[in-house]
Image (cartoon, rainbow, N blue to C red):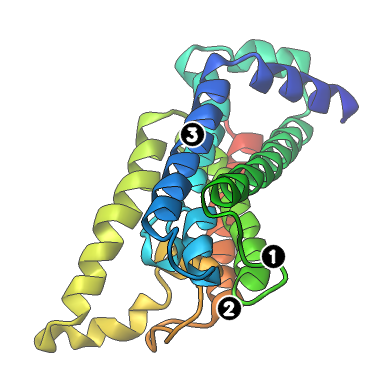
Amino acid sequence: MSDALRFEWVRIRTLRSTWWLIASALLLNIALALGIALLTRNDPPDGEVVGIAVTGGGASSPVPLVGVFLAVVGILATGHEYRYGTIQPTLTTVPHRSALLTAKIVVLAATALVVTAASLVTTLTTTLLVRGEAPGLTDWPLNAAIPGHFVLVLLWTVLGAALAQLFRGVPAALVVILVVPLVVEQLIISLSYVPVLHWLAPAVKFLPFTAGQQLVHLGGEADAELFGRWASGGVLAAFVAIVLAAAWTLFTRRDA
């Protein structure tokens, strides 16, 4: 297992795409925090406003800003091996498939947590530099939204790797991770408001990406069609677990 972890750590940090994606995630979140801080610099410190900057849009955004980039890191971490045909030498080096996939998930999860922490520090620092003050991290709603943000980014990262492993490539995984939350789920939500299609409304709370965004809910009136913060997070976690289990099973049973 230690060999697999070492192999995955060396591989992920030697991919230029990893650093470009992480840098893009951090810079875009800093830009968002800067814009919000400039627009609200004359207002009293507000946890909801700061939470939008810290979490990349909060629950109102269809996707988490940092989570999208880390999901692509996860997709490329697995998909590149099939795209460039390096999966066979990889399995020759680390022949235990379960150990290899476990190591990949562990390294990606650790990367996601570190990048999310770095994003938190940089956005709060940007806010403080512009406004001179910010609400405490232990104050509502930041004390609930920030842990939820860590979980959300972690789930997106693991899902990216699982989808690439399931489809054994990059394009299909990218389509799912982008088109489903941005197009398919938004269309279902919109159609649920049409009177003749109102029977779709109970299904909205089970849309994994929409439900997952409730992990960064920043207060105010919650959508009655959705579960609470952690129950909604459980919907996304269950979806990730199903995809990962399917990918894991196929990886251990089919040819490389």
143 vs 218, left or right, is right
Q: Which amino acid does label 1 sit on?
A: Leu
Local SS, label 2: helix
What is the count of numbered marks?
3
Q: Is residue 235 visible?
A: no
Q: How far apart are marks 2 and 1 (CA)?
A: 23 Å
Q: How crowded is mark 1: few (under 14 residues within 10 Å), some or many (20 or more)?
A: some
Q: Distance between the residues labelled 2 and 3?
A: 31 Å
Instruction: Indicate whether 119 appears above or below 80.
Output: below
Which residue is under mark 3? Answer: 27
In the rendered image, the quadrant that contains the N terminus is: top right
192 vs 225, left or right, is left
Which residue is under mark 2? Answer: 231
Q: Is residue 55 visible?
A: yes
Residue 188 picture location, percent across and down: 24, 69
Label whose residue precedes the other's in the sequence (2 or 3): 3
Which residue is under mark 1? Answer: 137
Q: Which of 48 and 98 is in front in this view?
A: 48
Local SS, label 1: loop
Q: Residue reaching furthest right?
A: 2
Evaluate if marks 3 and 1 touch, with contact meaning CB atoms under 8 Å apart.
no
Label whose residue precedes the other's in the sequence (3 or 1): 3
Q: Which amino acid does label 3 sit on?
A: Leu
